[in-house]
Image (tube, rainbow, N blue to C red):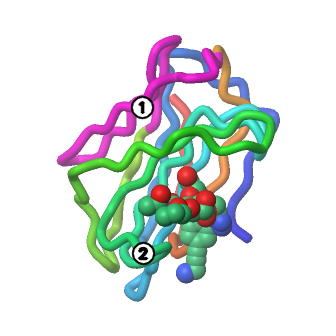
Amino acid sequence: KGLVVTQLDIEPGECIKVKGKIESDAEGFAVNVGKDSNTLLLHFNPRFDCHGDVNTIVCNSKEDGVWGEEDRKADFPFEHGDKVEICISFDETEATVKLPEAEFKFPNRLGMAKIEYLAVEGDFKVKSIKFS
Ligand SMILES: CCCO[C@@H]1O[C@H](CO)[C@@H](O[C@@H]2O[C@H](CO)[C@H](O)[C@H](OCc3cn(Cc4cccc(C#CCN)c4)nn3)[C@H]2O)[C@H](O)[C@H]1NC(C)=O
């Protein structure tokens, strides 16, 4: 399934650092943050080749189990087998995903004030998680 962390209490301005390795044959992976699996502030989903998308980051929110409007990013700073550190932070207006050489913003559509849930899914092997 993938790594799931619950009972978190991450506040605006704090950041979640997920370090890991993208599989050498990855089709895609996802990092989800929010309240729980049905209520996501951000589904950050880099796709190498899946659902008809090639080298595309798809971001979305989920409210009461229902996906919102997808937001496809222009940049794709990932390669198969990469070791990556993904830093996610947020405030009342937006979530920010910081990578060494790229940064992505996504609106805080739900007005979420606290992140309690983190899940990493797909072709990604988690090395460490840091909260700061
Ligand atoms: C053109 C008309 C139709 O439009 C399509 O309609 C699909 C269904 O709605 C959308 O796809 C959904 O998009 C949603 C975001 O919006 C979600 O990503 C959701 O996936 C949830 C999900 C997560 N996981 C776990 C996991 C995660 C990453 C890797 C793996 C793996 C592996 C082993 N190699 C597994 N499993 N399922 C996806 O299914 C497409 O984007 C959308 N395409 C466009 C262009 O619009």
Which of the labelled discs sits on residue 119, or is there none?
Answer: none
Image quarter for ligand 1 equals: bottom right
Left or right: 131 with respect to 53? Answer: right
Q: Based on the picture, tell me whether residue 92 belongs to the magenta stretch.
A: yes
Query: Dot 1, crowdedness within 10 Å: few (<14), some or many (≥20)?
Result: many
- Mark 1 C-beta to ligand 1 under 8 Å: no
Main secondary structure of the magenta stretch = strand
The stretch in magenta equals 88-112
Query: Dot 2, crowdedness within 10 Å: few (<14), some or many (≥20)?
Result: few
Name the residue tied to disc 2.
Answer: 52
- Mark 2 C-beta to ligand 1 under 8 Å: yes
In this picture, is 98 found above or below 20? Answer: above
Q: Is residue 38 visible?
A: yes
Name the residue tied to disc 1.
Answer: 106
Q: Is residue 121 visible?
A: no
Of 87 and 29, which appears nearest the observer? 29
Left or right: 102 with respect to 21? Answer: left
Q: Residue at x 69, y 66 (%)?
A: 2
User: Label 2 is placed on what type of residue?
Assistant: Gly
User: Label 1 is placed on what type of residue?
Assistant: Phe
